[in-house]
Image (spheres, grey):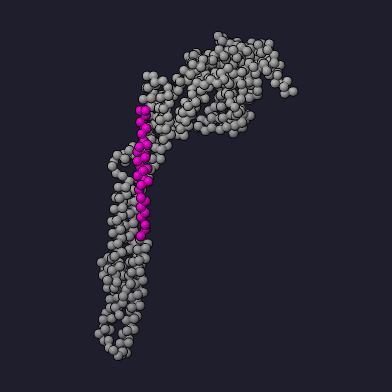
Amino acid sequence: MNNEKNNERTLYLSKIQPDNQGEQTLSDEIIAMLESIQHHLNQNFSTRHTAKKLREIISDLTPVLKVLLIGDTESRKSQFINTILNRHLMPTEFNGVSRVNSIIHFGEVDQVTAHFLDGQVAIFDAQQIELFAVSDTFSSQMMRDGLDYLDIQINHDLLKSFAFLDTASYEKNLFIKESFLNRCPSVLWILNSDFKNSPTEKLMQAKLEHYAKSLHFIKTNDNIICDGKRQMTVSLPLMTEAIVENDSSKFAQSNFDSLLQMFNDSKQSIEMYRTNLMDRLFKWINRFSIESTSLVNRDPYKEAYSLLKEFSESGVSLMSMSAEFQQQIKIFDVQYESIRGSFQQLETAHQLIVFLKENELQKKVEVQQFINLYESYSSEVIEYRKVFKNEESEAQKQAAEKIQQSSQQVLLKFDEVKNIIFKLVQNKLLIIENQILEVKTQIEYRLSRLFNATKRLQAFDVIVEAKKEIELLIEQFEPTQSNKMYLEMVKEIPMDHQQYVQSFLQQRAELMKYKVDKKSQAIYKEVLEKINIIMPL
């Protein structure tokens, strides 16, 4: 049964066999270079559209005829594609895939790649073209709204010689993507019985003539009236019968043979195809040069480049910035030690009283009370010493008890004074800490700005790599005057940020990481432990 089915299709398969096997326009080495350049540019958001244009050129490296399909919503364009390919590929509903632009070409594996306007790409099974054909679901509508075009890859012998660029079906306004027009030397305008050759359609015909396109009008029945010079009536039902029945006469009657002949007549020689492809490639290189130069002259590149270049040429290194910072830290350390030393000298109560008065702490009630109590205590000690005898009398005993009570009062009041001293220490050290923090913040802010500038500029490294590879690419071709001009144009793109980025990163790698420890908490504790009142007993 399978053999009979295969025999039925022998005639169709023989007619669609490719005649360009093994032909290629550029060497494998150059193709690899183009793919590498496209990969680099696709990684930077600013050059994704440029990368997309190069991807179109790479896709056209195989010398197959690109046929542009035009038709309104009732033209049965999807049915035409399905019939000529002898498979149900394109949805035939009114709101089918013809609502979007599609490229149908050969591929070893059947699949659909959706290219969205924001640069994202999603791959689907070929059976899922219907996802873009269903108009009554919110998700499908969202998919179509953000869609640029569908890349439909099919393993089919006919597509080894021809590729179809199916435009979105029009109603009143007829618009065709410029990239589609540029890629297709041949145009099939599929008509329906309501074709009126409106002003919009006439304008499109004039545009196609301006682009020197080979335009043919395809009528699906003889009742369609068309004034075009090149027109052909194609019977889709008869073509289907011819394929199924393996009937050569029906192939001829359906004009299938004439259609294929028309395609072949529109094909360019490999030399002409290569010439046109090289013309597109060098136009793309010109576009890359202009856009890259424009990127250099605007933010975020311009601001980051200016900041890093200014630092690099200022003569100030990260190490010198760090040395300056450390010198300031040393000054603050001396102040720390000075504060520590002033408290370490407080070994007697008299020294403490003098310290309190020097820092005008006696203005505080608690401190003045402490001073009064201590002075009273000292007077009692002095009097006690005057009346002291080896043999303890009752009066001497009472005086000692009174001194002991005064000492306890002094020590109790000293607990309040210690809190005041603590706050004094805290305030003095806090001032120093704030000064350190201010200096550190200034240094870190400068370093942060410079580091962020390097990050922004490093995002353009992929463009620099693409630039280098484009220079090598041009050198692979014949050194004509025109090619030399393009080479100089690319070389003059002023994207030399890498030298400044490398210099900064090297300095940053060598820079020692200095850590400013908070010393205050330790000093607070140390100061309070050092202040020991030595009672003069």
Q: Quadrant of residue 373?
A: bottom left
Q: Is 292 left or right of 153, judged from the image as shown?
A: left
In reply to whether residue 192 is colored magenta, the answer given is no
In reply to whether residue 504 is colored magenta, the answer given is yes
Q: Is 274 left or right of 391, judged from the image as shown?
A: right
In x, y percent, where is residue 324? Answer: 29, 50
Name which residue lies at 55% across and 12% down.
265
Name which residue lies at 37% across and 63% down.
522
Relative to 365, does residue 514 appear above or below in the rendering?
above
Q: Quadrant of residue 391?
A: bottom left
In x, y percent, where is residue 279? Answer: 45, 19
Part of the protein shown in magenta: 491-519
Which image quadrant: the C terminus?
bottom left
Q: Quadrant of residue 6?
A: top right
Name which residue lies at 58% across and 11% down.
231
In x, y percent, where is residue 266? Answer: 54, 14
In x, y percent, where is residue 320? Answer: 30, 47
Which image quadrant: the N terminus?
top right
Please tell me how many numbered marks the rendered image carries: 0
Viewer-proximal residue among 475 and 284: 475
Relative to 390, does residue 480 appear above or below in the rendering?
above
Name which residue lies at 36% across and 34% down.
496
